[in-house]
């Protein structure tokens, strides 16, 4: 099975992530970027939904099992190349030429939660999974572009609480705090997201120009930020 795949439902492209916990490593990031290119090359697609094949996990963020050996060996070039590619994915989703929806099928942690904030809209299943930024407990700092993505999609007081406490939110709590558009049982999650996506049958050039203005400052923050360097076997900015 490929790491990513997509199918069309009228004008809606539904991408499925097939990498288990969908942790970020170079192979996964390349597969994600490639499938986004494939969808964009499909002229019938006017809206994008991304879901996980794992019914309990949407994404658990950076693949630390892959990354930490490079951190510990102070392989700065490999680490920086990884974070640049991760930024490429954040920007690609943020500036995609059609409306984007994350159908959050379960746990959405750390980098996975940050990625979900790059989407225009989020739906999340009820009854299973938390939305959480545990970086404060892991000792991993947020980069400026990451915080800019959070501030786009989460009310500022919640950005502060979630970053400083590492609190976990259920789908219902995410809906209450306007982080997601709707909390749904798993069997209703994709149909709800598709139903909404089909109302977003807009012209791509118009969507692109709107995003150019809406997200200009976020793109700037992601593009010019400093990538973490390695010090004493740890990441720091």
Image (cartoon, grey):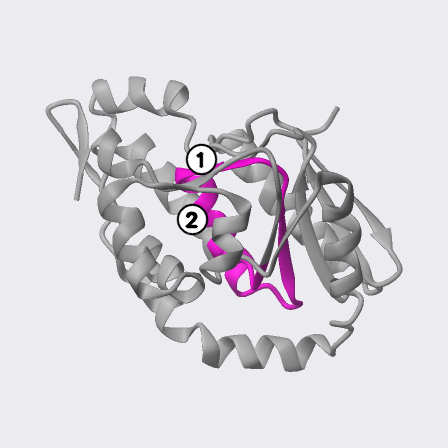
Q: Which mark is residue 61?
A: 1
User: Pointer 2: residues within 10 angstroms few (<14), some, or many (20+)?
Assistant: many
Task: Report the side of 84 relative to 29 (left or right).
Answer: left
Residues drawn in magenta: 92-121
User: Pointer 1: residues within 10 angstroms few (<14), some, or many (20+)?
Assistant: many
The CA distance from mark 2 to mark 1 is 8 Å
Residue 13 falls within the magenta-colored stretch: no
Q: What residue do we see at 51% from left, 61% from top?
A: 94
Q: What residue do we see at 74% from left, 63% from top?
A: 197
Q: Position of residue 113 (x, y in %)?
A: 45, 45
The answer to whether residue 203 is above or below residue 168 is below
Q: Is there CB contact under 8 Å for labels 2 and 1? A: yes
The answer to whether residue 96 is above or below residue 169 is below
Say what secondary structure mark 1 lies in: loop
Question: The N terminus lies in which quarter of the figure?
Answer: top right
Say what secondary structure mark 2 lies in: helix
Q: Is residue 139 visible?
A: yes
Q: Is residue 179 visible?
A: no
């Amino acid at each position: 099975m490929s790491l990513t795949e997509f199918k069309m439902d009228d004008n809606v492209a539904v991408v499925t992530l097939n990498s288990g916990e969908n942790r970020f490593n170079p192979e996964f990031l390349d597969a994600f970027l490639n499938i986004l290119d494939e969808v964009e090359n499909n002229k019938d697609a006017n809206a994008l939904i991304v879901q996980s094949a794992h019914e309990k996990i949407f994404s658990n963020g950076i693949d630390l099992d892959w990354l930490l050996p490079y951190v510990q060996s102070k392989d700065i070039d490999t680490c920086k190349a990884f974070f640049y590619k991760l930024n490429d994915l954040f920007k690609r989703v943020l500036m995609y030429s059609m409306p984007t929806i994350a159908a959050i099928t379960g746990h959405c942690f750390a980098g996975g939660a940050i990625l979900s904030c790059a989407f225009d809209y989020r739906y999340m299943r009820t009854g299973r999974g938390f939305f959480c930024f545990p970086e404060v407990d892991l000792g991993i700092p947020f980069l400026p572009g990451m915080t800019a993505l959070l501030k786009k999609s989460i009310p500022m007081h919640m950005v502060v609480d979630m970053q400083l406490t590492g609190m976990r939110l259920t789908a219902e709590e995410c809906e209450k705090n306007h982080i997601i558009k709707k909390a749904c049982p798993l069997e209703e999650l994709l149909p709800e997201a598709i139903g909404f996506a089909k109302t977003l049958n807009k012209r791509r050039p118009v969507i692109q120009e709107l995003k150019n203005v809406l997200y200009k400052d976020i793109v700037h923050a992601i593009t010019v930020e400093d990538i973490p360097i390695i010090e004493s076997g740890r990441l720091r900015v």
